[in-house]
Amino acid sequence: MKREWAAGALLLLLCLGAWLHVGHIDALTGTVSAGLERSQQAADRGDTEAALAALAGARAVWDRERTYTGVFLGHQERDSLCDAFLELEAALRRGEDPRTAYERLRFRLEELGRMEHLRLGSVL
């Protein structure tokens, strides 16, 4: 009987950990997305310096979580998101139209959030 209780407790801990992880990833991607939105609004106004500053703030939020994301996320997902940050920064610095780069980075953030959410298919 003790084994069943231990297994049940372990299962509850795993569920709690998954729930906390998803909440943390949602908060992280939400904060980064808010900074990205501020950056795009500045770029739309033609204020490249403010757009770069807001983008740097969003990137700093992401970089502060490097240890967490390095443990709990796949390297390919992290790398593609970092590449999207660099691509957007380069487009802003070159004076190119950054809309595609903003959309690509936004897509990567949303994709990351979707991948981390629990679904029946991901459990089975």
Image (tube, rainbow, N blue to C red):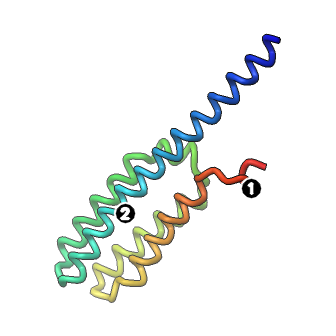
Q: Note whether 91 is above or below 69 in the view shown.
A: below
**Figure quadrant of the N terminus:** top right
Nearer mark to the viewer, of 1 and 2: 1
Residue at (29, 66) in percent of width and height = 55
Residue 113 percent coordinates (x, y): 52, 58
Q: Note whether 88 is above or below 25 in the view shown.
A: below
Residue 120 percent coordinates (x, y): 72, 52
Q: Secondary structure at mark 2?
A: helix
Residue 99 percent coordinates (x, y): 37, 84
Q: Residue furthest top?
A: 2
Q: Type of residue at label 1?
A: Gly
Say the numbered circle drawn on residue 50.
Answer: none
Q: Type of residue at label 2?
A: Ser
Residue 51 percent coordinates (x, y): 23, 72
Q: Residues within 10 Å of mark 1 (few under 14, many from 20)?
A: few
62 sits to left or right of 25: left
- Which of 33/56 is in front? 33
- Which of 53/112 is in front? 112
N-terminal of the pair, mark 1 or mark 2, is: 2
Residue beneath label 2, please?
A: 33
Residue beneath label 1, please?
A: 121
For the residues bearing labels 1 and 2, Cβ distance under 8 angstroms: no
68 sits to left or right of 74: left
Residue at (67, 53) in percent of width and height = 119
- Displayed quadrant of residue 86: bottom left
26 sits to left or right of 57: right
Q: Note whether 10 is above or below 3 in the view shown.
A: below
Q: Residues within 10 Å of mark 2 (few under 14, many from 20)?
A: some
Q: Secondary structure at mark 1?
A: helix
